Image (tube, grey):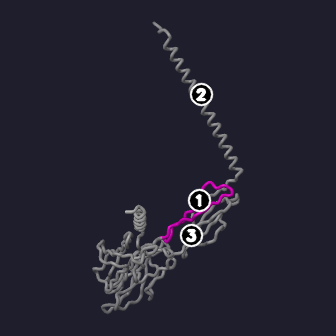
Amino acid sequence: MHPEITVLLILFLVEKEGSAKERPVVTFTPCWNKIFRGETITMTCDVKPASPVNMSYSWYKDNNRIHTGQSFVITSAETPHVGNYQCEGDYSERSDLIPLHVSKDWVILQVPLHVIEGDDVTLRCRHYPGYSARQTKFYKDNVGIRNWESDSVLHIRNITMERSGGYKCKKEVYHNLLYYKHTGEDVISVKELFTYPEITMSHYPVLENDTVTLTCKTNLSPLGQKTELLFAFYRDEQNVQKFGLSSQYEIQSAYMKDSGNYICEVKAKRMLKRSKAINIEIISQIKKKSVTKQNIVRIIISGFILIIAFVFIFYHLKFMKRLSTVSEGSPAIRL
């Protein structure tokens, strides 16, 4: 094979192999992971940032391959459909395990499949289709958070990670000529939308007239890839760059006045997170020369001390050797 073709083939394989690090995200439509028997649900496999048009997909239930295609539809759910589902695309990892529950209980609590901080979350307390129901009460960690009302839906605005926990609802359902109270429950695990930012600088130390770039680093959750992050920078609590799409701030031709404590902020939806501060000290050319002279003096003094130490050790060893020779040549003392 021609060497150039071999190189191109290797690069192509490396590029394909590099995409293997992408992990797909499974979504449900409707978005609940708990449904009643006989209901329909569609599962979709999303590979980010952009899936090739000709990518093929595989679906797994409890680690057994069951389907090919980007979507998997269950038209009339039954108990055998209960299990953990995963998908994978060409050159991608498998997705996380996503559980599907198919219930025949009187009441179920439906929570969204994925909950990210900053979301507006809706919880639905549903009773089995075909029956009448009335008052509903909601709980979090067994503590009532909404008293009996006719509305079977609970809205949580701008949810935070602290709102994670076990949720439960009680509902009065009419059957056998009476209203009976039945309970549904589930767990909400709120995921982080993006990590707390870290501010870094392009180089250190920074001298006068240098150009230094500050970068605000954060990791966006795969579940929020469509979320737009905005960045801002501050020096000593004074805004130096307003919120925008750029995660970098550049100090051009740095002056002494640019010294200070720098932080960055990241916001998305209604979430705002701030980095820890880093201190930047702009070193003047005069100070640089002074520091250089001091370093030269230190080097000279250190060298002088080493020379003295070397001379001292040399003559000490020479003296000890001479003393040893004299001792060996002296006549022994007899008693």
- Residue occupying the point 59% across, 59% down: 202
Q: Secondary structure at mark 3?
A: strand
Residue 271, percent across and down?
Answer: 54, 73
Q: Nearer the viewer, mark 1 or mark 3?
A: 1
- Amino acid type, residue under disc 2 in the picture: Val
Sequence order check: which comes first, mark 1 or mark 3?
Answer: 1
Residue 285, percent across and down?
Answer: 70, 52
Sequence order check: which comes first, mark 1 or mark 2?
Answer: 1
Residue 60, percent across and down?
Answer: 32, 74
Q: Which residue, as the protein is rendered here, is positioned at the far right? A: 286
- Amino acid type, residue under disc 1 in the picture: Ser
- Amino acid type, residue under disc 3 in the picture: Val
Q: Which residue, as the protein is rendered here, is positioned at the far bottom? A: 177
Q: Which residue, as the protein is rendered here, is positioned at the far front? A: 2
Residue 273 drawn above or below residue 134: above
Residue 312, percent across and down?
Answer: 59, 27
Name the residue that disc number 2 marks: 311
> How many other residues sit within 10 Å of disc 2, few (<14), some (14-19) or many (≥20)?
few
Name the residue that disc number 3 marks: 266
Give residue 151's quadrant in the image.
bottom left
Residue 318 drawn above or below residue 147: above
In magenta, the rendered stretch is 192-220
196 or 110: which is nearer to us? 196
Q: Is residue 182 visible?
A: no
Name the residue that disc number 1 marks: 202
> How many other residues sit within 10 Å of disc 1, few (<14), some (14-19) or many (≥20)?
few
